[in-house]
Structure formats: structure tokens, C-alpha cells
Image: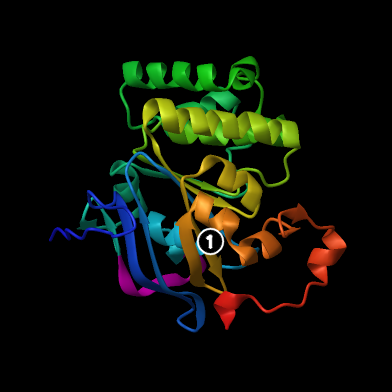
Amino acid sequence: MILIILDTRFPGAPPMLELRNVQVLYDRAIEAVRDVSLAVPEGQMIALLGSNGAGKSTILKAISGVLYQENGEIMSGSVALDGKPISGLQPGDIVRKGIIQVPEGRALFAQLTAEENLLMGGITRSRADSRAAMDMVYDLFPRVKERRHQTAGYLSGGEQQMVAIGRALMANPSLLMLDEPSLGLAPQVVDTIFDAILNLNQSSGVTVLLVEQNAQLALDVASYGYIIENGRIVLDGTVETLRKNDDVQEFYLGMSGGERKSMRDVKHYKRRKRWLS
């Protein structure tokens, strides 16, 4: 069955990826995601923002089909790629459809070299295609090329993140999902990685779903964003709209009245978020 649904947030064509009213439970008891709907148009970079534990990673796992590893399950709602349901498919089948996730924490094969990790990402492709993809990764991340023969477990955190993204790109994704790519990295390294992601999106047209706690960083590169709290989408809009929202400024950008606040002021700010009223 093909679901042809035009999303009013992105007029003109059905989204590449669409979640409609998705509910996820762990152990059939703990509700992690409730009634989540979001759309990812082809060729765009979409940000999913929220604090730790808000449900961001659960949404990515639901899309990738790996919830079962943590006794999670989609209890209701649908996930569709190009109008076709993918809920219930095996993770390998979802990967073959072009959805590739870079997990939080990178999850490299620590005993393999950087280049061997890349080759694992392109294992389903021909030798020629794999070689071309590896050259593309090395062009995108010259540091990885320099370290390609080093054991992945001994690389720096930033180098490991570059390898993890490169491994995902080896599979030629149509939709790249990134889970907290800035986590634990130095600002200069984060800039390098996000410049590469933005270049990839703009020059190659790879669609990106970006999960981030760093709202400022995500809003700098994305075109549209969703904010999730306590497992529910509480706000969405273009990055320009989100930047102007008083609650987003106050609780996610650390600003009030266009001026940056101290972390102490943000921590002790007591006004109730309007979207929770």
C-alpha cells in the first residue's frame, strides 16, 4: 500500500519520511514517545531538538527498526518512506531502502582500523562503488584519510565521529540520521563536522534528520525544526520562526529579549513554558 499524503508544512510534494501519531512503549509499560508526527522532505536538513531523555533517540530507533534491542515497540501510528509503510521491517531492509543512522556514541568497531570500519559500511556495494565512496569520505574528512590505518579505538572522539559518519555515507544513504553528532566534542571539531554535513546536504542533496541538544548549532544548519519534550512534539516551524519564539529563546538558546542570559539565570528561570499550558 502507498500512502500519498501532502503535508501542509511542506507544500508541493509528499515528504520523503513521515511519522504519523507514533506511540512507542518500552516493555509494553513505559511510554517514551506519544502521538509524534513529523515530516522530512527530500533534500532538506531537519532538526529534532530536545533535552536529554525527551525521546529523540527513541524516534530514530523507531525509524531504523532497532527498538527491539531495548524491548521497545511501536504500539500505534505509522512510519512511511516515500509513501510506503516501513514499520515492522527488519533493520537490514530499512538500510537497503536508504535510511542510515549514525548512533549516539559512534559505535565503531574498536578493534578495526578506520578504513576497515568504512569498508564495513559499504559491504553491500560493489568494489568500484565502495572505492568511489571511500574517496568521497576522504575528501570530506581529510583527517580520516590521515588516520585510515590506525585502530579506531585509539582515535580521538572527533576522529571517531568522522569515521562513524563516513561509514554511514559508504552505504550511499538517501536519508542520513545523525544522533547527537556534537556530543562530547571540542567546538573546533564540531565546526569541522557540521561544515561537512552542511556541505554534503547542499552539494549532494542527501536528506538529513539531525538530532541535537545543542539548539543553536542545529538551527544554524537546518531549514526546519521540531522540539520534543516528554515524548511529545510541542513546537515546530522554520528555523527563523523558532529563533523568534520567546520560549525557544528562553529555554533552548539561553536568551531573553534578544540578549544572552547567564547559565544561572536560565537555570533559575521559573516562567512556565507556554506550550505546556
Magenta: main secondary structure equals: strand
Image side of residue 213 versus residue 129, left or right: right
In the image, 197 versus 106, the foreground residue is 197
The residue sitting at 46% across, 36% down in the picture is 168
Residue 149 is situated, as x and y percent measured from the top left of the image, at: 62, 18
> Vertically, is 190 above or below 219?
above
In the image, 97 versus 256, the foreground residue is 256
Q: Which residues are magenta?
A: 69-78
The residue type indicated by label 1 comes to Lys
> Vertically, is 143 above or below 16?
above
The residue sitting at 79% across, 65% down in the picture is 266
User: Where, by quadrant of the figure, is residue 18 drawn?
Assistant: bottom left
Residue 16 is situated, as x and y percent measured from the top left of the image, at: 29, 49
Q: Which residue is mark 1?
A: 56
User: Where, by quadrant of the figure, is residue 164 drawn?
Assistant: top right
Image side of residue 187 versus residue 136, left or right: right
